[in-house]
Image (cartoon, grey):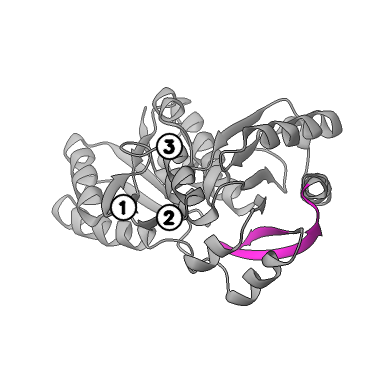
């Protein structure tokens, strides 16, 4: 490929998918039981969800500066053009660290053509952007072309999701205490979305069954050409509900290209088991 696409593990694409599409991954770190693990490499999502169900509180940290430096230097020496699409800067310091390491490496290798971009996306919303960029790279598009079209996709990517317990997001500082409060009310399910890279509560839904229906309603309100774009559903160890949502979407919109994967270990450590998230474009697919 003329351009190497780099992503971090918060895109929630499985290793097999990333390898198939020639995407280079950098892993965030998950801290559990006084041990550090590499998301998607030395720890898998199911281990994190099982630990959370047993009352443990895993923590996460961004991709290390050294990891960025080593990878960037490797591609700089090879003369490889690179595009690093980063996890939302509102949810992690990974993007800022990458920018610092980019500057440092480009001082040593001034001819290194590397762009570092904040997608303002998370989980498979971010993953869909990365997959589009990888497809363009395989087509032989230039770095500028891929960057521009990736930008269109992340600017128009909707994230609609629900969690079983807002306490996990509150604990990690991802939502406010006030937002977390309504999630503790009896049989109330929170519906959230991402706005400018931040997690924002959207609605309170009474009853778990109604949440999936409401997600498809929001999809209808916001989505464009839903039958002809790839969409994604990520889940916190709840494949049954994810497939139920996918079937509702197929029936209602005729969507054929639906990616279903688990929420990865680093994002899952904050969202918790039982999370269901839906990702689609609010503009025509390009």
- Numbered tag placed on residue 142 in the rendering: 3
In the image, 232 versus 30, the foreground residue is: 30
**Residue 152, x across and y down, in percent:** 59, 48
**Residue 264, x across and y down, in percent:** 47, 42
Mark 1 vs mark 2, CA separation in Å: 8 Å
Mark 3 vs mark 2, CA separation in Å: 46 Å
Q: Which residue is mark 2?
A: 56
Asked whether 190 falls inside the magenta stretch, the response is yes
Q: Label 3, secondary structure: give it.
A: loop
- Give, as a single range, the part of the protein colored magenta: 189-208
Q: Residue at x 19, y 59 (%)?
A: 104
Badge 3 crowding class, 10 Å Cα cut-off, few under 14, some 14 to 19, many 20 or more, is: some
Residue 106's place in the image compared with 178, above or below, is above
Q: Quadrant of residue 41?
A: top left
Discs 3/1, front: 1
- Numbered tag placed on residue 33 in the rendering: 1
């Amino acid at each position: 490929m003329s351009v190497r696409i780099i992503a971090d593990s918060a895109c929630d694409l499985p290793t097999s998918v990333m390898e198939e599409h020639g995407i280079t991954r950098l892993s965030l770190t998950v801290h559990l039981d006084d041990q550090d693990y590499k998301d998607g490499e030395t720890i898998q999502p199911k281990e994190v969800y099982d630990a959370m169900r047993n009352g443990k509180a895993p923590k996460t940290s961004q991709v290390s500066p050294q990891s960025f430096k080593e990878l960037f230097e490797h591609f700089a020496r090879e003369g490889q053009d690179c595009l690093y699409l980063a996890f939302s800067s509102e949810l992690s310091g990974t993007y800022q660290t990458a920018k610092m390491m980019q500057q440092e490496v480009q001082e040593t290798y001034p001819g290194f053509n590397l762009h570092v971009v904040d997608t303002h996306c998370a989980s498979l919303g971010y993953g869909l952007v990365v997959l589009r960029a990888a497809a363009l790279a395989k087509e032989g598009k230039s770095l500028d072309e891929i960057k521009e079209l990736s930008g269109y996709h992340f600017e128009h990517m909707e994230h609609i999701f629900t969690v079983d317990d807002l306490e996990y997001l509150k604990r990690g500082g991802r939502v406010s205490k006030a937002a977390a409060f309504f999630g503790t009310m009896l049989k109330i399910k929170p519906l959230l979305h991402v706005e400018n890279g931040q997690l924002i509560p959207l609605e309170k839904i009474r009853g778990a069954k109604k949440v999936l229906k409401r997600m498809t309603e929001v999809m209808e309100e916001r989505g464009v050409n839903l039958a002809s774009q790839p969409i994604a559903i990520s889940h916190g160890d709840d494949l049954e509900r994810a497939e139920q949502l996918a079937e509702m979407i197929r029936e209602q919109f005729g969507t054929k290209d639906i990616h279903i994967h688990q929420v990865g270990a680093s994002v899952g450590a904050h969202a918790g088991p039982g999370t269901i998230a839906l990702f689609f474009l609010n503009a025509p697919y390009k």
